[in-house]
Image (cartoon, rainbow, N blue to C red):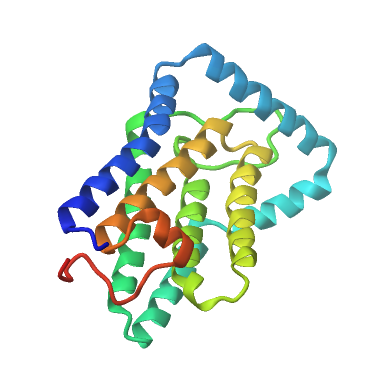
Amino acid sequence: MVMTLGTRLATAAAITVAVLVPFALLAIMVTGDWRPLHELDATITTALHDWALRHPGWVTVTKWWTNIFDPNPLRLAALGLVVWLLRRRHRAAAVWAVVTVASGGILGALLKLLVERHRPDFLEPVARAAGYSFPSGHALNAALVSGVFVLVLLPVVRHRWLLWTGVATVTVLTGVSRIIIGVHWTSDVVAGWLLAVAVIAATTMAFTHRGFLPVAEHGVDPSLSVYSKA
């Protein structure tokens, strides 16, 4: 059954709110300096930092990983996907990809300025990063771009579990790598993932005739856009 535009947007709002609730709770706990969250963050970050100090070889590998999957290379990869879609005249899917990645990146940058959370500070840091900490830009953009790739490529791949496994690996390891090298708290990374899911759900519902779950199962239909007749 084809949903009307109003129904699609209402469903998008419901899904987005459902994902944004835990994100909002995290943001409130971070800005309010909620002690249990701070202690949990500190415990995990300290444990991983101590592990990093004992394993410099793995730190080098982790730094390579976090640099390869930095937001800018990820955006270039997304741009390549957009060009691929345009060459195949899939304009609606290309616009959806651009809107998803751009809106998520802008939201992440604005939230960093609003929350103004400082990064972990160690006497013996293994890495440094500029700017504020919440949410993690690496985690956010890894999840955003991975989500865009998986929803675009689902219709054309034979072994979908390989695609899902690949993007899940990139998303998880990119986020965890930021905690290991001590430039993000765990809640920063989780917040980045949650925000990415919310953005992908909202733009997918707004641009397609189908619900988010069918799209996540079968992929984005390049011919469907919010401007098409419902």
Q: Position of residue 94 (x, y in %)?
A: 33, 73
Residue 185 in view here:
no
- Residue plotted at (53% across, 31% down): 187
User: Which of the two residues, 12 or 26, is positioned nearer the viewer here?
Assistant: 12
- Report x, y in % for residue 26: 44, 27
Give the residue displayed 60% in from the left and 17% down from the top: 39
The answer to whether 86 is drawn above or below residue 55 in the figure is below
Q: State whether residue 123 is above or below residue 190.
A: above
Which x, y percent locates residue 100? 34, 58
Tell me, yes or no, if residue 139 can be seen here: yes
Q: Is residue 173 above or below residue 101?
A: above
From the viewer's perspective, tell me whether residue 130 is left or right of residue 31. Answer: right
Q: Which of 160 and 20 is in front in this view?
A: 160
Q: How many labels does the image show?
A: 0
Identify the image quadrant of residue 108: top left
Locate residue 184, reporting x and y percent.
56, 36
Q: Quadrant of residue 89?
A: bottom left
Give the residue at the far top of this rendering.
35
From the image, which quarter does the N terminus lie in?
bottom left
Residue 46 position by quadrant: top right
Q: Which of 51 and 140 is in front in this view?
A: 140
Q: Which residue is drawn at 63% across and 38% down?
A: 179
Q: Which residue is drawn at 17% across and 66% down?
A: 230
Residue that protrudes farthest toward the front in the picture = 1
